């Protein structure tokens, strides 16, 4: 009997993209699927589109008040009946006729926990990107030790029972780097990872309405608070791990923290707010940021670790740019 794949799409004000995204799934060359749309309190007509799409027997829709993409994914996962689950964003698409190849690869390797896929972006459709090394089959910790830190969820397929049996969920209410925490938890536990080498996903980086790209002050604050919450959660998780795994997480967490401080600089957060962030990170053992084996990242980490120099750079950038 062929594997069943559950697709979970959190939907929030995605009326411009939703039909195309769902169509890219329903038009695949593999029929044993279900598609769960979780309408997360949309206000732009997405709810009506979801209901129309649910006329297809393979599609079901859940309506809920706005609680964030993470909570919407958790709701979808609780309802998923497939052998494997694929979390797709409502403004992205699948590569045509990729699903049968992916399923064949999963079946060939036999009960894998995670299948990694190649992906392209809508702005660079000719360029194939990878978030993992070229090793075909590995354990989760080995994967984490080799990753460059791009721990996205949409270019991976997860074994449903593996997620449910281990209680692996997204941090409720978060909408920034929630996939980072989720995948760290996944790969710390996963026994069997396969890098399929199959091009499966088109990430839409042209959607100006995406919450992750909005630069409104309220949204920037939310993105910052989510980053802090995720980093604190990973630090808490790390403290319970054996030394070898702690070292692996150190490298990934340091790079993510450096990226967060870079965003505080680039998006011109208030200096007083940045000072509060310093206090939180120092209190919780996340600052000074530990160095990593990347020249550019380490140079920036060195500046951040010289707190007053970094604050001066932030002040100058805010005034002059």
Image: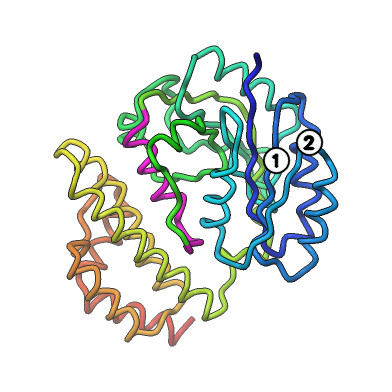
Can you say whether 271 is above or below 247 in the image?
A: below
Q: Quick check: 160 left or right of 248? A: right
Quadrant of residue 72 within the rendered picture: bottom right
Q: Which residue is mark 2?
A: 26
* Residue closest to the far left: 243
Quadrant of residue 192 within the rendered picture: top left
What type of secondary structure mainly makes up the magenta span?
Answer: helix
Looking at the rendered structure, the secondary structure element under dot 1 is strand
Q: Give the number of the disc on residue 35.
A: 1
Counting from the top left corner in percent of width and height, residue 58 is at 76, 36
Q: Quadrant of the N terminus?
A: top right
What is the span of residues highlighted in magenta in the rendered image?
173-190
- Does the magenta portion include 248? no
The span from disc 1 to disc 2 (Cα, nearest Å) is 9 Å
**Is 109 in front, or is 127?**
109
CB within 8 Å, label 1 to label 2: yes
Quadrant of residue 229 within the rendered picture: bottom left
**Badge count:** 2
The residue drawn where x is 17% and y is 36% is: 244
- Name the N-terminal-most of marks 1 and 2: 2
**Is 96 in front, or is 306?**
96
Crowding at dot 2, Cα within 10 Å, few <14 / some 14-19 / many 20+, comes out as some
Q: How is the image coloured?
A: rainbow
């Amino acid at each position: 009997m062929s594997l069943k794949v559950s697709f979970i799409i959190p939907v929030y004000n995605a009326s411009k993209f939703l039909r195309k995204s769902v169509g890219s799934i329903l038009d695949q060359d593999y029929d044993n699927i279900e598609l769960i749309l979780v309408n997360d309190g949309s206000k732009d007509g997405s709810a009506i589109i979801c209901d129309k799409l649910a006329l297809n027997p393979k599609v079901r829709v859940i309506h809920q008040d706005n609680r964030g993409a993470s909570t919407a994914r958790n709701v979808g996962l609780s309802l998923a009946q497939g052998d494997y689950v694929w979390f797709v964003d409502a403004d992205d698409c699948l590569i045509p006729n990729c699903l049968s190849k992916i399923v064949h690869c999963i079946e060939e390797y036999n009960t894998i926990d995670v299948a990694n896929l190649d992906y392209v972006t809508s702005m660079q459709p000719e360029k194939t990107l990878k978030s993992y090394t070229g090793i075909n089959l590995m354990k989760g910790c080995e994967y984490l030790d080799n990753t460059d830190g791009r721990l996205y969820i949409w270019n991976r397929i997860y074994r449903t029972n593996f997620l449910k049996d281990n209680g692996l969920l997204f941090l409720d209410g978060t909408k920034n780097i929630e996939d980072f925490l989720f995948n760290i938890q996944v790969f710390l536990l996963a026994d069997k990872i396969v890098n399929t080498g199959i091009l499966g996903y088109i990430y839409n980086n042209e959607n100006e309405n995406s919450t992750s790209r909005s630069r409104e002050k309220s949204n920037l604050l939310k993105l910052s608070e989510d980053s802090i919450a995720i980093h604190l959660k990973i630090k808490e998780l790390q403290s319970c791990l054996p030394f070898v795994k702690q070292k692996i997480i150190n490298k990934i967490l340091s790079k993510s923290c450096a990226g967060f401080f870079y965003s505080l600089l680039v998006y011109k957060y208030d200096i007083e707010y940045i000072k509060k962030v310093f206090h939180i990170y120092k209190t919780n053992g996340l600052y000074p940021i530990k160095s990593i084996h990347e020249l550019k990242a380490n140079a920036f980490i060195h500046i951040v670790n010289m707190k007053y120099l970094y604050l001066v750079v932030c002040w100058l950038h805010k005034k002059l740019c």
